[in-house]
Image (cartoon, helix red, strand yellow):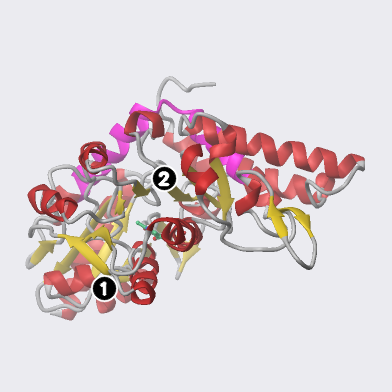
Amino acid sequence: MILNHLDIDKIRKQFPVLDQQVYGKPLVYFDNAATTQKPLCVIERERDYYLHENCNIHRGVHYLSQMATEAYENARKTVAQFINARQPQEIVFTRGTTESLNLLATSLGQLLVGEGDKVVVSAMEHHSNMVPWQQMLFRSKGELLVIRMDKNGVLDLNHYEELLKQKPKIVSIAHISNTLGTVNPIKEMIAMAHKYDIPVIIDGAQSMAHQVIDVQDLDCDFYVFSGHKMYAPMGIGGLYGKMEWLEKMPPYQFGGEMVDKVSFEKTTFNKVPFKFEAGTPNVGAALGLETAVKFIQSFDRQEVEAYEDELLRYATEQLSGIEGMRFIGQAPKRNGLISFVIDGIHPYDLGTIIDKMGVAVRTGHHCAEPVMTFFGIPGTVRASFAMYNTKEEIDVFVKAVERAANMLR
Ligand code: PLP
């Protein structure tokens, strides 16, 4: 069912965690880029699984095992439809974005990256989309090429084109930066790489909850994401990959489930996606993820996006009046979050004080230390929004920032 308009009060009722006081103040939760809260339907789905359906999957002939297997494979179908994958088998369940990227650095790396080869990432990557490539390239004596960005947090596409001319083997870039909020022009960047026959991985950790993703329209080779940033439980996420790649790629981890025939001499492997799902998966969380997808789909996505954009615009406007305010990341296309520093004030001190006023934001380098080095700052204060946040909460937040800044100046 699609709601005609967003009823934020009704939405908030589905997130009981929001309805509490911290330090005697109503909680304002603006740390959604780190993890979103979970609606009751997701919590109940996981609980129901453990109450009535818990069983290991793909292995048993008995009733419960078959039910759990069917439910898990249905979850895969739902996720595939959500991002418009060609077939459910193109979805590999993982623990989340980090595991998906490690899988790719190991497996796709093994397939494509030889000694001295290059991989392209951007200057605004989360550590998860940088360190796995860097470590893999240390071993292969290769080179990490980094797309430059400007002071607004916009990638330099001319520089990108120059890097592509160096014939890297893989491009791996964030859809939306978790520190700057920049929405990268990934469709264009994918097409640019494809002109050189280079596969592209998109880190969608920050986009799945906020934007409509169509992997066929984007034509990305891989798209990775975390459930817990899109209203689903922790410990589940995924990797979309084009079947022709997944079939060619070697397994990432070895053990039960991912094998076909095993002897002491030789092992053959299961088909995609099971080849990449060694061991017992987090079935309950996968069912929670499916419910989270359905939860997101129950709203008009354009309306949610417009609402969240309005929250961002309003927060930017309200904060800009504060003395010494410096926004980090001013790309024309931003989504979901606002990052800033205030002259002479350490972000950590500011975050700690506003926490005592009930406001939860993230402070620090947000797992993107090179971004902080680029801007010459130790960290930022980051407020990130979800569909259940309100302008009233932004007013509380802005007042808290103002008060804290006055105390610290
Ligand atoms: N990539 C981006 C852009 C992120 O924002 C995050 C988490 O904040 C990650 C990767 C890592 O996600 P996870 O910790 O869920 O694996």
Label at residue 127? none
Percent coordinates x, y for residue 1 in the rendering: 55, 21
Q: Look at label 2 and name its amino acid.
A: Tyr
**Upstream in sequence: badge 1 or badge 2:** 2
Q: Which residue is mark 1?
A: 369
Count of marks overlaid on the render: 2
Please identify the quarter of the rendering in which residue 367 is found: bottom left
Relative height, residue 60 to residue 397 (above, below): above
Residue 297 in sight from this viewpoint: yes
Q: Residue at x 35, y 34 (%)?
A: 219
Give the left or right position of residue 374, taking residue 401 as reference.
left
Q: Which residue is mark 2?
A: 223
Q: Look at label 1 and name its amino acid.
A: Glu
Comparing 118 with 304, the one in front is: 118
**Residue range of the region highlighted in magenta in the rendering:** 288-315
- Please say if the residues under marks 1 and 2 sit with CB atoms less than 8 Å apart: no
Percent coordinates x, y for residue 164 in the rendering: 18, 51
